[in-house]
Image: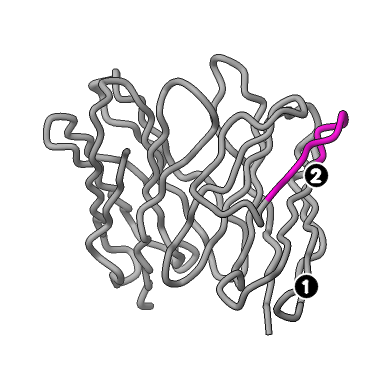
Amino acid sequence: KAGVTQTPRYLIKTRGQQVTLSCSPISGHRSVSWYQQTPGQGLQFLFEYFSETQRNKGNFPGRFSGRQFSNSRSEMNVSTLELGDSALYLCASSSDSVFFYEQYFGPGTRLTVT
Amino acid sequence: AQTVTQSQPEMSVQEAETVTLSCTYDTSESDYYLFWYKQPPSRQMILVIRQEAYKQQNATENRFSVNFQKAAKSFSLKISDSQLGDAAMYFCAYRTIQGAQKLVFGQGTRLTINP
């Protein structure tokens, strides 16, 4: 079974621009979560989508948004990029059954804002 | 809100020796999950071991085991017979038993294996 894939793997953007990152979960998984990883703040939860609905959201400004499609693929968007948005963005998928709670992580998208 | 603290930013161990990584957490919940994740350099984060808070028995996965002290809110990871491939960032994580798939991570411990 293929793992979680994220595209693109690397991205360089200029302050003020917007960016869209994509995540394809493991086949059959309906939950996709997004995390931001920075040296200063560590790993922080952004949001989770399940069956096209945002189920939980972390403490990030409204510039960070996401969505999930009917095939469970998810995208996150960051508008009006700031230098501090430079980070590794990880997504994780889970089957989200009652008895299964493991999250499988993708390789991440490295975003650099200049 | 739950918090997770890893007090050791860096650890090193000789190959074949045993090392213990520390993690403490704060929560008012009685049931929850705890995890240790490994993030090798430039590679994907993978789950090493998990512990359900309602289970008194400490989880074990091959060379990896935990010491779960619920009253003390402590969750340490022991790696036995350390191997070069164990070199990575290790993150302790907490998840509430109900609700969304949200992990709360500690700051991580960078583990170096000396040959």
Q: Which numbered mark, 1 or 2, is in the foreground of this view?
A: 1
Residue extent of the magenta highlight? A65-73
| B113 relative to B46 in the view: left or right | left
Residue position for label 2: A24
User: How far across and down, in percent of the image, does residue B112 sit?
Assistant: 37, 73
**Protein chain holding label 1:** A
Q: Which of the 4 quarters of the picture holds residue B9? A: bottom left
| A57 relative to B88 in the view: left or right | right
Residue B103: mark = none
SS at badge 2: strand
**Protein chain holding label 2:** A
User: How far across and down, in percent of the image, does residue A65 sit?
Assistant: 69, 48
Q: Which of the 4 quarters of the picture holds residue B86? A: bottom left
The residue furthest bottom is: A114
Marks 1 & 2, CB-CB < 8 Å contact: no
**Looking at numbered disc 2 in the image, what kind of residue is underneath it?**
Ser
> From the viewer's perspective, is residue B52 above or below residue A17?
above
Q: How many C-alpha atoms fall within 10 Å of the one at disc 1: few (<14), some, or many (≥20)?
A: few
Q: Where does the C terminus of chain A fall, quadrant-wise? A: bottom right
- Give the mark, 1 or 2, whose residue is nearer the N terminus: 1
The number of numbered discs placed on residues in the rendered structure image is 2
User: How far across and down, in percent of the image, does residue A5 sit?
Assistant: 78, 51
User: How far across and down, in percent of the image, does residue B21 sit?
Assistant: 27, 56
**Looking at numbered disc 1 in the image, what kind of residue is underneath it?**
Gln
Out of B30 and B61, give the one closest to the viewer.
B30
Q: How many C-alpha atoms fall within 10 Å of the one at disc 2: few (<14), some, or many (≥20)?
A: many
Q: Where does the N terminus of chain A fall, quadrant-wise? A: top right
Residue A17: mark = 1
Q: How is the image coloured?
A: one colour
| A31 relative to A72 in the view: left or right | left
